Image (spheres, rainbow, N blue to C red):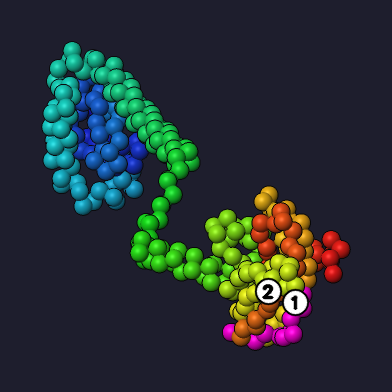
Amino acid sequence: MHQGSSMHIVCPHCMTSYAIKLASLGANGRAVRCSRCKETWIAHAEDAIEEASVPAMAAASQTDDQSDLAEQWNSYATDDRATDAPVVDSPSIASDWPEEEAKETEDGWSAAAREAEAEVAGVQHQSWFRGLFRRRGARVSRPAATAAPRKSYFGLPTACAAMGALVLALVIWRGDMVRLLPQTAAFYKLVGLEVNLRGLAFKDVKLSSETVDGKQVLVIEGVIVGEGKKPLDIPRLRFAVRDAQGAEIYAWNTVLEQTVLRPGERAFFRSRLASPPPEGRNIDVRFFNRRDIAGGSV
């Protein structure tokens, strides 16, 4: 080969040819990079070929670029020098190129390995964080939204009015309440309210005494008032004499001539007891009931 002649080197990866001077390759070859496929290889002087021996495919692909090959080569040589590439004319540096190439290759592989490892670590890191957030999201439960308290439209005056109306109704319709719930009779008695289930009431009951045939006669008289909403039958009247301890010592019954009492109507009654017991202190007047029948009173 002619050291001063213009020869061509061919990229072993894409078969692109470049015109160079053999002297630039040196005795041990030179690392070059293809401007087309960006691959790097070691070009030796014995690998250079003359222009006539350039493969047809490479020659055809470079028909438009043959005039600029020298300039491209020079530009890549400049780039190699900028990146601390060895100078071709320096024998000592050229002799170390294989080690540099191996180092560059190793550095390239190391960089690629680091990038791959960083990507994997990034994915693992990201997945770990996602899993962490998923676990946190699964564990942490959001507090239930508390509904705002609604504004009450019933104030203290309204509550007092409602309570007063309820108490008034319990007083007015206490008879109906006791019929519906008999156990409430004890409550009304406790608060001092009389419950009249019959709809009949005694009014103006008076006691007086007379002397008939030299004997003292006790006279009991009064009025029965109809307080119901419909005509009511007047039952028999029950008179009882009680001693100082409240025990009943004598009793008798009487029947009125008027047997029906309309609402608001009055019926007068009068009864006499000859020779009343001397230990008697009080007389009760009431209507005859079932307990009197059970006790044998007629």
- Give whichever of 224, 37 is nearer the camera: 224
Up-down: is 277 above or below 274? above
**Of marks 2 and 1, the one in the foreground:** 1
The reply to whether residue 27 is visible in this rendering is yes
Question: What x and y, as percent, mark residue 2?
Answer: 20, 28
Q: Quarter of the image holding residue 296? A: bottom right
User: Magenta includes 159?
Assistant: no
State left or right for residue 140 relative to residue 235: left
Q: Is residue 260 magenta?
A: yes
Q: How far across and down, in percent of the image, does residue 12 sit?
A: 34, 36
Quarter of the image where the N terminus is located: top left
In front: 66, or 276? Answer: 276
- Looking at the image, which is closer to me, 286 or 119? 286
Question: Which quadrant: the C terminus?
Answer: bottom right
Secondary structure category for the residue under label 1: loop
In front of the other: 256 or 145: 256
Can see residue 177? no
Q: Residue at image x 31%, y 27%?
A: 111
- Magenta residues span 254-264
**On the picture, is 111 further left or further right than 120?**
left
The amino acid on which the numbered mark 2 sits, given as a three-letter code, is Arg
**Under tag 2, what secondary structure?**
loop
* Residue 235 circle label: 1
- For the residues labelled 2 and 1, the Cα–Cα distance comes to 10 Å
The amino acid type found where label 1 is placed reads: Pro
The overriding secondary structure of the stretch rendered in magenta is: loop
> Sequence-wise, which precedes: disc 2 or disc 1?
2
User: Can you tell which quarter of the image residue 30 is in?
Assistant: top left
Q: Which disc, if any, is residue 198?
A: 2
x and y, in percent, of residue 17 in the image: 27, 40
